[in-house]
Structure formats: C-alpha cells, structure tokens
Image (cartoon, coloured by chain):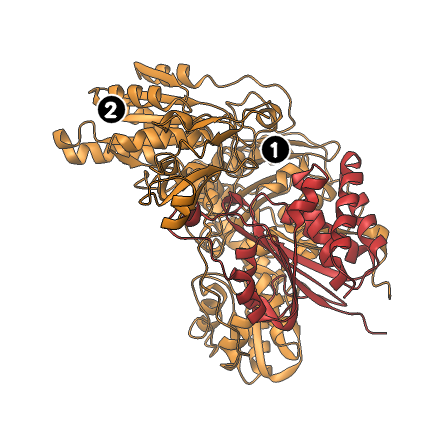
Amino acid sequence: MTVPKGDIFLAGVGGQGTLLASEVLCEAFLRSGFDVKKSEVHGMAQRGGAVTTHFRFGPKVRSPLIEPGKADLLIAFEKIEALRFAHFLRPGGAMVVNAQEIFPPSVATGQERYPEDVERRLRAVTDRVFLVDALAAALSMREVRAVNMVMAGAASHFLPLPESAYEEAIAVRLPSKIVPVNVQAFRAGRALLQPA
Amino acid sequence: MSVLVKKEEIRLLSGNEAIARGAFEAGVKVASAYPGTPSTEILENFVRFEGVYAEWAPNEKVAVEVAIGASMGGVRALATMKHVGVNVAADPLFTASYTGVRGGLVIVTADDPELHSSQNEQDNRHYAVAAKIPMLEPSDSFEAKEFTRLAFELSERFDTPVFLRTTTRISHAKGVVRIEEPSPGPEFPPGFTPDPSKWVMLPVNAKRRHAVVEERTKALREFAETWEGNRIEWGDRSLGVIASGVSYQYVKEAFPDASVLKIGLAWPLPERLFREFAAGVSRVVVVEELDPHVETHVKALGIPAQGKDLLPIVGELDPRIVRHAITGEASPVRAPEAVPPRPPNLCPGCPHRGLFFALKKLKVTVTGDIGCYTLATLPPLSSMDSCICMGASIGNAHGMEKALGADGAGKVVAVIGDSTFLHSGVTGLMNVVYNRGASTVVILDNDITAMTGAQENPATGKTLQGKAARRVDIPALCRAIGVEHVYTVNPHDMKQAEMVLRREVARPEPSVVITKAPCALLPEHRRQKRPVYEVIPDLCTGCKACSRLGCPAIEWVPFTPEEAASAGKKPTQRGMARINALLCDGCNQCPPLCKFQAILERRS
C-alpha cells in the first residue's frame, strides 16, 4: 500500500495562531504513522507581519520547505495572504481561505485601498477556492483566538485523516484546559465546508 | 495505514527542541545563553528537564565564560546563541580552543541565512576554521539530537570545545526525533583539578597549547575521514553533489538518484573522502548556503568542482533553486501576485510607539539598536536612522557628536532597549561620561526581552526558571556610571515624554531618559482589564492625526465623494478613521491626538 504524501502551505498574519494550527495538523499525521516535517519562522516576522508555515507529510520527507508551484493545499487565514502565496499552489490544488480582512499598514494608513478583487484573482489561480468565515465562527463561540482551529477544521476535508486523528492531536498538544474549546472550534470549522 | 515508526520512541521536535533533548540525554548540567532568533528555544526547552541548571546570561560572552567555567569544574556544559552572538563571544572562544575542556563543552551557533530576523547573514563556519574548533552540522531535527549527544563525546575525547551549527531551517523546522534515555555524562566526577599549563593562558603556556591544538586538528581530520556522519551515498555517477546541513535535504529532494557526499562535520573537512568521491563521479557540485566554505577547501585539493558559480551566495536555498542551478531547468511557476506588503509592525499598545512619536517631533538623528523598536524605522514613524549591532546606538551617538562638534549639539539621540542596554550598552554609556560627551540616551524599559518572544533579563526581577531575582536598578546604574541627569517617563503619555526629551536633548551634558511601560504582549498586561477605544464617526473629520501613529488597530475607511455625502461629511473628506476593537489594546496614545475629541472609550 502506498503512503499518500502532501504539501500543505499555511499563510496568515502574525498573531492569528497559524503556528498552533500547523502544530495540530502535523501531530495528527505523525501519530498516524507518517513522516512529517514543517518549517516556520519566528522572531521579528511575527509582529503583525505575513507569516507562513510549510507542512509536508509522506512516507519520507526530505526538504522542510515546499517548492513554489507544488503545494497541494493552501490554508490562508487572511484573504490578501492567500493571494500573496498563491504561487505556491500546484495546478489544480485547493485553497481554504478565511474571508477575514486584516488591513496591512498601507491600507490602514489610507495610502491604498484593500484590494476588492481578491476573490476573483484567487479563482484565476485555481477553481478550487473555498472561502469560509472563520472569524464569525470563532466569535459565535466568543473566542476570537479560535480562528486557527476553525481553519484547521475546514481544511481537514482536504486531508486524508479521519476527524478523530485531529481531535486526538488537539488533546495531546494543547493544555487540557483549552482542549474542549479547540475541539469545538475544529468541529465548527469542519461544518463550514462539505466533504471534498 | 502503514506504521512507519514506533510511536512511543519518537516525537515531533523542532531542531531547537531536539538540541535541548540531546543536551539532556548527554548529561549536560550547566547551560547559559543570551536569547537570539533562531536559537532562543533551546534553553527555554532545556530548562524544563529535571536535574539541570540553565540561565539567561546578560550577553553571549558571559554565557560562554559560564559554560567554560562549568566545563573546568568537570561537568558537561552548553552555551547557545544566534550567529552574531558568536561575534560577542569570540574572545573567550578562541582561547577556550587552546585550553580545551574537562567536561564536554558545546557552543551552538544558530545562523540565519535569508535574515529572517537578523542584521546580517554571516556564515559562522568561518569561526570553526579561525578558532580551530570542530563544528558539527545537522541536516534535520533527528540529526540535531544525535549530533548534540555526539558533540559532548567528541569534546571530551579530543579535549576541545565543539560547535554545533544550525540554520533557521534546522532550528525552526520540526521533524521526527528518536527519544533515548539520558547518559550519565562524563566518566569522571565533578571537581576542578588545578593545572596552570592547561588553564592559565600566559604566553608561555598558550604557546605550548597552540601546538596541542594543531595536533588535535590532525586527529580530528582523521576522525572526519571515517565517521559515518560524513558519508558517500553512491547513486548515478554522472552527478556528484557535496552538501551539508539543510542543503543536503534539498539535494536529496531535487536529485534523489544522484551520488551525494554528505558532510556532517563542517570542520575539519575530510580530504581523502573528497578525493574518493570526486574520482567516482563525472561532475562535482558543492551545494551550500551562504559562503563557499566546503567549495574552497575542495578546490584547494585541486578537485575541479562547481559551487557558487551556479548557486546564490545570498539568502537561503530550496529544492527548486538547487535543481535550477544544477540543471538549468525548473518547471514554470506563476509569478507572485502584486499585493499590499505586510511588513512586521509594532503591536497595538506597544509603549515604543509613544516614545518614537514624541521623538519624531524633535527632528533629531536617532542612532538605534537591536530589538522590536528597530521597527520604528518603518513609516509612518520613520524615526530611527541607524541599527548596527547590540549596544551600538550609544557609541554611534557619541561618535557622531564628536564628528559634528558644536553643529551636532542637541541633534543626536541614542535609543536602546533594557535588555540590549544590559547586554552591551552599559560600556558605551560609560564611554560617553568618561570622554565628556553630551549624548542623550533613551532606554526603552518594557520589563522583558521582547523581540525574541519574552525572555527574562537582569532587570526583570525573574530568572529563566521564573524564580525571583534581584533587579538591576537601571536609573541607579546610570547614575553610578556618572550620568547626573536620569529621568523616567511613561511613554504612553507622549506630551510628557516630548517635554522631557526636549529638555534633555538641549542639555550640554550626558543624560538618560528611561521610558517605563510593560510590553503589550506580557501575560500580566494582557490579563489586566483595559479600555477599548472607538472613533465617533460623526466627529471624525478625516484629518489623519491618529493614523500617524501607525497603530495596527487604527484603520482608514476611504470615501468616494458620494460616500462622504451620504455619511453627512463634506464632499472633500477623503475618509475617516476607525478603531478595530479586536486589535485595540487600550493604551490611550491616540485619544489625545484627536483635536475633535472623536476618540472615546467604548461603552458596552
């Protein structure tokens, strides 16, 4: 039996919890018997800047970085960030995009407008664009920090593990006090999209 | 699903976590470090193990000196730092190479190709050559742990400090690691045995030790020839690639069938192995990030090899860059979309923003330093004019004043963070006082080492373990150095900060202004109940006075003339400000800036 492999690219804005989301996905694959690697950058870039995580699974993973044009799935926590890293997606790859808009400095200070055609431009990259309102789902749980698990839940439809594998990973990786709210957020995210 | 590895023995660890685990397994008893991306998490993870001692030192030189002392005392010792930290620690390191060790002594240098969070991208493999210290270079988390254990064994076996070099894609990449039981450590009990010929580096002793170092390097070169970490993986003989570190992974990804010589010991290098490999392949390419370290040594043997003629010397590599460099081919990739840039920014509620907003009004030259506050160089604050290295701001300001003479009086201000000041700013300030300078130095005291993710320092009152510690009294320290004018201000109160700054900059004597307010990311701060502000739309005239703060929570809502009209505004009003309630930290910097009193505390 061949072990599936996958290259998952996560993009967001520093502070959105992309690192924790990738941590849970990665742990779920490790516990399911895959080789995994992921790469991210800490430090200065985290101060509200664009942040990315490269996550790869398969029978044997070499490079911790995904090549441009090779990612199977792009999980974007913010619309502009989806567009910024869209060139990492392979032809026919899928994008799960949080509809949330976080203004970059040039927009927040009025030098330019938030681009209005993001969705159209994303659909020009691939016809498999799935927009979700992760912020609304998190706010309905009164926990704005849960955006990351909502996104992980929505994206899980495009990954080959059963739901239980991710929930186990959440239970293993997170402090017990916050496991229930994160499992709830993951399920809420999963409910936002239909199985692929 | 096939189970590839046994679950109980493996763990998903970053390179830094793997090094911490490796140090624990090697029986390390003492570890010292100054935080620096991408090295910081090593000590943060190491300190959690039972039976170890770990500490934040004020700088990397002290960290290495502490580790040397622990090694002299007969235990295994670790010092970790980012690449530029080795510059600071180089003085003790070069002589520790001569003395050798008692307990194993390992120095981690975490390099940062691509400058993800650094002021340069120096290649610290040069330090191994220059200091004559062997250097191990893991290619993933798995090897990071294995090599860390080995580093301590080599250190004792060859009587030498050992470098372990990582790069950001090792330190901050996660991978599978095999967990093992800790070893008991060295085969001798702790204790210092006096031996001046080894430990007291008077010229007469040091001269003898230099000869010992040269013999040691020969022995290590022999080790390099036979150690399994340097190995040939024969494949297709038409291409032979020599690679080390993460570059090895990129090569295996891009050329799974090629012959590869994997280098795990970046210094000293295995000459016979290079010759054997070169003789077995028709083309030799050296793939390494940054400088042509391996390439230079391969070519010195007369081996015709390619390297930096194909591969970039600037920035990090990836499999695509490697494939393209060697074959000239790469599958087409769509061009990145043009989108508004999103550089890092000072956080909402950051006390530094208030200080720089006030400082900007003075129209002075600002010599800066290393920390979050370096971001104040970006618009709209645009109020930092230089950034060289840890502690440089104060010397830079003093030098510029001496250069400009009377023309420079009251026109230069040095800005430095609390942790950076204690790291290497104190001596600069001493110099200002001693040499009759008149610089104004602003110390941004936010109660933490913030940029690297909130580490304690000698002025925070807590140790790495979170235990209470005596705080360095920064104002008293400045006075003890001889600064007579030391004032503390609240940077969120920008009016007061500006007033004090104006007065001190004009003063023809050295002065220190300390801005005291906690980092907005500190848990103690975040737990506090804080107000949230809002812009009352009817009152906002769109003057943008608040936008000039560059606060991420203040958003500009642009108007078309029609939108302005329907909002009841003058048709010439281009837009208005809005405060994002999810981001507002309640710092109260923006309300006083609004002449129209349009920014009020939100009631809900």
Q: Relative to A193, does residue B51 appear above or below in the rendering?
A: above
Residue underneath mark 2 = B505
The answer to whether residue B197 is seen in the rendering is: yes
Q: Relative to B112, does residue B526 appear above or below in the rendering?
A: above
Residue A35 drawn at (x, y percent): 75, 62
Q: Relative to B265, does residue A134 appear above or below in the rendering?
A: above
Check the residue under mark 1 and report the chain it is in. Answer: B
Q: Nearer the viewer, residue B284 or B506?
A: B506
Label of residue B70 in the image: 1
Q: Residues within 10 Å of mark 1 (few under 14, many from 20)?
A: many
The answer to whether residue B136 is seen in the rendering is: no
Q: Which chain is orange?
A: B
Q: Residues within 10 Å of mark 2 (few under 14, many from 20)?
A: many
In the rendered image, the residue lying farthest to the left is: B406
Q: Quadrant of the N terminus of chain B?
A: bottom right
The Cα–Cα distance between marks 2 and 1, rounded to whole angstroms, is 45 Å
Q: Which residue lies at the image location 46% right of the left edge and 53% below the top edge? A: A114
> Horizontal placement of B399 versus A109: left or right?
left
Query: Do marks 2 and 1 share a subunit?
Result: yes
> Horizontal placement of B517 versus B74: left or right?
left
Residue B176 drawn at (x, y percent): 74, 56
Q: Give the colour chain A carries in the figure.
A: red
Residue B399 drawn at (x, y percent): 23, 35
